[in-house]
Image: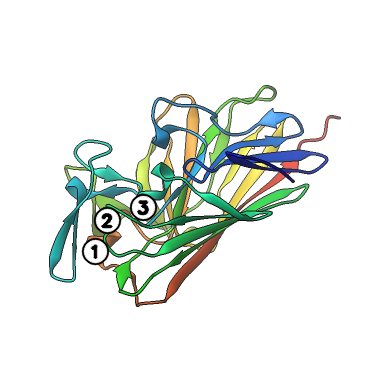
Amino acid sequence: MTTAADRLELATNHAAATVHLDGGRLASLMVDGLELLVTDGPKPTRWGSFPMIPWCGRLPFGKLNFGGQTHEFPITSAPHANHGRTHLQEWEQITDDSIRTELGDPWPFGGHVVQQFELSESALTVTAEVHAADQSMPAMIGWHPWFRRNLDTGEEAQLSFTAESIYVLDDNAIPTGELTPIPEGPWDACFIGLENDPVISWPGALDLTISSAFDHWVIYTEPEHALCVEPQSGPPNQFHLGPRVLGAGESLIGSMAFTWATHKVS
């Protein structure tokens, strides 16, 4: 493991991961010389694998109603505030494999977040902790990885998973809380009741299994260049559907893991 002023780098004989302190983002994941992630994009929500904290997905019209008050947040993908705040913040390295950021303005409740990254020859595990400060607050954790459809070798990515249902979206692409059977893709939706961990296979290159302690998954297959498989602690709009509330000093902890197996050449 090596560090620079603006990043944390982890490496084994066959894998390497780079985490940018700007946004707490997994900026690169290399397996046997193959880059699995989209490594740049036109805006912070379009590349790498970034944390979605303290909320996941779209916060409708940038408004949070909590504790009898309405709090407003900057619109980041009109007309909504997308994917929390921590992907827009600076993080600091606190150990060889972990980073931290404070939850400050415009988040009114305080608190802080820690992420830890563990890399082995066959897996990368990312753990996040959200810690409330001296007042209660709603909280979510999620990650938004952008996987390349095409690697430098092998065939185009194939995604496989089985789920029970997805959340119905309103006219503003916000989950209503109602569940419905899964339609044909492409998708930009939150799935629940997964029967197996999602697997992305690049035939002729490798298989990647995405697993998580969380049970909600946003799967986004509309882009031509990428697939997004996003584990998160609840559905987008959970703050209004039924938030998970942390009391003063309480924490929310969860993890995701990428596990890979390289295809052998016969």
Near mark 1 (Cα within 10 A), the count class, few <14, some 14-19 or many ≥20, is few
Q: Nearer the viewer, residue 113 or 56?
A: 113
Q: Give yes or no for contact between labels 2 and 3 (Cβ–Cβ under 8 Å).
A: no
Q: Which residue is mark 3?
A: 56
Decide if residue 41 is on the left or right side of residue 240.
right
Near mark 3 (Cα within 10 A), the count class, few <14, some 14-19 or many ≥20, is many
Decide if residue 27 is on the left or right side of residue 67.
right
Quadrant of the image for the C terminus?
Answer: top right
Residue positioned 78% across, 47% down in the render: 121
**Mark closer to the chain start, 2 or 3:** 3
Residue 76, percent from left and from top: 27, 38
Among the 4 quarters of the image, the one containing residue 240 = bottom left
Considering only vertical position in the picture, is 136 above or below 37?
Answer: below
The kind of secondary structure element at disc 2 is loop
Foreground disc of the pair 3, 1: 3
| Extreme residue toward the top, this view | 152
Residue positioned 79% across, 39% down in the render: 14
Looking at the rendered structure, the kind of residue marked 1 is Leu
Residue 116, percent from left and from top: 60, 57
Looking at the rendered structure, the kind of residue marked 3 is Cys
| Extreme residue toward the right, this view | 266
The Cα–Cα distance between marks 1 and 2, rounded to whole angstroms, is 6 Å
Considering only vertical position in the picture, is 43 above or below 160?
Answer: above
Q: Which residue is mark 1?
A: 241
The kind of secondary structure element at disc 1 is helix
Q: Nearer the viewer, residue 64 or 103?
A: 103
The Cα–Cα distance between marks 3 and 1, rounded to whole angstroms, is 13 Å
Q: Nearer the viewer, residue 135 or 201?
A: 135
Which mark, by number, is residue 237?
A: 2
Looking at the rendered structure, the kind of residue marked 2 is Asn
| Extreme residue toward the front, this view | 5
